[in-house]
Amino acid sequence: MVRCAIVALLFICAVNALAQNVLENESKFYKISTVPVPDSIMLEVGGLAFTDDDKLGVATRRGEIWVIDDPYQKRSRTPGYSLFASGLHEPLWLAYKKGAFYTTQRSELTKMSDSNGDGLADLFQTVYSWPISGNYHEYSYGPLILPNGEMLVTLNLSWVGRGESLTKWRGWMLKITEDGKMTPFATGMRSPAAFGLNAYGDIFVAENQGDWIGSGRITHLNAGDFAGHPAGLKWASEPGSPIDLERSSFTDSIGIMYDYAMGKPHFKVPSIWFPHTVMGISTSAIVSMDSEEAGPFKGQLLVGDQGHSKIMRAFLEKVNGQYQGACFPFREGFASGILRMAWGSDHSLFVGMTSRGWASTGKELFGLQRLIFPEQFPLEIKAMRITTTGFELEFTKPIDKAVAGATENYKMTGFTYSYHKKYGSPVINSGNCHVEKAEISEDGTKVKLTVNGLRAGYIHELKIANLATPKGEKLLHPEAYYTINSFPEGTSHTHHAMAHSQAPASATGCGTDPTKSIHEQPSEWKTGADVTINMATKPGLKFDKEILEVKAGSKVKLVFDNNDDMLHNLVVITPGKGEEVGQLAMDMGLNGTNAGYIPDTKSVLFHTCLIQPETSQTIYFTAPKPGDYPFICSFPGHSFVMKGVMKVR
C-alpha cells in the first residue's frame, strides 16, 4: 500500500510539473499573431469568411460586416478595413459564395451583395426567415455551405428558466437551398453555436453545457437525427419533419443518455464529450484540418472554446458504423473568447473572438488573431484508437521504449454525466480502469494498452507521466479523453465488470466544509439577522451589486437569487485572495462540479452552493473583522468578471 501511494504521488507530481509548462511550450510550436484592429472598430467577431480575392470578411455582434484587405500583413503591418454592411441583427456566422456574403440574423438567412462594385452592400435578400418571440436567447447560426451548394443553419432554443422552443423550429438544424426551400434536417439541440464538416463531409454539431446537456460535446448528425434535447420535439409532428420521437416520453430525469438512446435508431449520442471545465466550458467552432500543413493531424478536427479562450483537437474513428474518439488540448492563450475560426490561403488559422456577455479567460473584449503552424511538430498523442483489449496510442515521434513500457505511467478513469432537465451534471459513476500491459511497437511510435474496466457510454480520461523521446523531448499534452460508444467486434475485456452507484440527479456541489455554507438561521440568533442582503445577477455575467457594506461582527443573512441562465455560486474570500481562489476553482478538474467549484482552502470564508438557474439560496454568517473581502462566482471562468467587494467596517 505504501509503495502504491508513493507511485501515485510521483505520478501526480510529474503530471503537474508538465502542466505548468504547457502554455510556454505550446508557444514554441504554435505561434499566435495578432491582427491589428483600428481603435474606432469594435470587432466583436460573430463570423469569418474569405472572399474569392483572399480578403477576410468579419461579421460582428454589433450588426456590421467588415472586409479586411491583406489580413496576413504581407504588404503592411496595418491591414485595411472597409465597412461592407451594417444594421444587421446580431449576426453570429458568415459565409461567402459566388461574390456574395451570407449570414444568419436573429430571424432570417440573408444574402448580401454589392451590385455596383463600390465596396458597400446595396442588395439585401431574405433567403429564408423564421419567427422569433423576442426572447434574448434566440441566437441563430449559419449558414454552413455544403459541397452541393445547399446551406445549413441552426436555431438556439429560447430560455425561460430552461430551454424551450417558443417559436417554430427552435432547437433544429435546417437545410435551405439558394431559392429559399427549407427542409427540417435534425433536432435535439439547445445552443448549437458551432457545426462543421470533417474531411469526409460528415456533419458535426457542438453543444455547450446546459439543461439536458451534462457537458460540452460534438455529435455526428444525419438527416432525421435527434441529438438529445427534447424541446425541439414540439415541432416533430409538423409537415416535413423527419423525426417521430415524442417529447412526452422524456421524464425530468432519465439516468444516462447512452442507456436511454439504446434501441432508438435516430437518437444520436455524442461522438466526443469535452469534459466540463477540464477541456473547456463552451465549445464554439469546428474546423477540419485538411491541408498538408496540419502535419500528423491531417484529417482531424479543431474545436474552439469561448470561455477558456483555447483550441482543442479531436480524433475521430468509426466503430461499428458510428463515430467516437478522443479529444486533446491543443493551444491555449488567445486574447479573448474564441467564437469563430477560418483557414487562410497560407493555411494559418484565423481566430475571431468576443467576450461581451460571455466571460472568457482571455481578458480582451474582442480580438482577431492567427495561429501559425510549425514545420516541426511537438511530441503529441497523434491518435487514440480503441482495440479489442483496450487502446492503441500513436505518437507523432518515436518514444523512449523503456519509459513507455511501464504501466505505472498510465492512469485511466471512466466517468459519465446524468441525463436530466437540470442545468449541467456532476461527474457520476467515476471508477478507475486498470492498465495491465503496455506493448511498444518496433518503431517506437505506438503503444498498445491492455485495460480492464472500460464501459460503453462513458468518457475515459487518460493521464500519462514521464513519456519522452529518446532525446528527452517531453510529451506536450499528457492527457486525453476518449468517448466509447461501441466496442470493436471480438472485444475480450470485461467492460461491464465495474459497478458504481449513480449520483442522484438532484445532487448539487457545495464544497467540503459545511460550516462555510449555513442554510438555516443559527439557533443562537434569537433576534434574527442584523442585516439582510439580497443579491441577484444582471446581464454580462455580473452580480447586481458589486459593493456590499456590513459592520464587523454583525449577523448577516445573504439571499442569492440566480436569475441567470447559467449555474452560479457566491463565494466570500479573505482579502487579496479573489484571483487565487478563482484560479484554484479553474484547476479543480473532474471533481469540480461535485464540490460546486468551491476550492478546499482557508481563503474561502462563506459560500452558497452551485445553484441552478432561476433558483435561489440563503446563507447565514457573522461578518469578519474590518477589511475588504472579495466575493466571486467561482464557476470556472466567471470569476474574471463576476465579482465584487464586501466592505466590513
Image: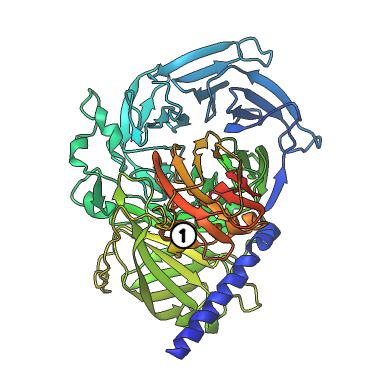
The residue that appears at 59% across and 35% down in the rendered structure is 356
Q: Quadrant of residue 73?
A: top right
160 or 33, which lies in front? 160
In the image, residue 549 lies at what x, y percent?
Answer: 61, 44
237 relative position to 35: left or right: left
Is 543 rendered above or below residue 275?
above
The quadrant of the picture occupied by the N terminus is bottom left
630 relative position to 600: left or right: right
In the image, residue 590 lies at what x, y percent?
Answer: 45, 62
In the image, residue 192 lies at what x, y percent?
Answer: 42, 37
Q: Quadrant of residue 86?
A: top right
Return the residue at label 1: 592
In the image, residue 627 lies at what x, y percent?
Answer: 67, 54
83 relative position to 256: left or right: right
Q: Amino acid at mark 1?
A: Gly
Q: Residues within 10 Å of mark 1 (few under 14, many from 20)?
A: many
Can residue 375 be seen?
Answer: no
Residue at the far bottom in the pictured view: 2
312 relative position to 23: left or right: left
Q: Quadrant of residue 99?
A: top right
Is 434 rendered above or below residue 304?
below
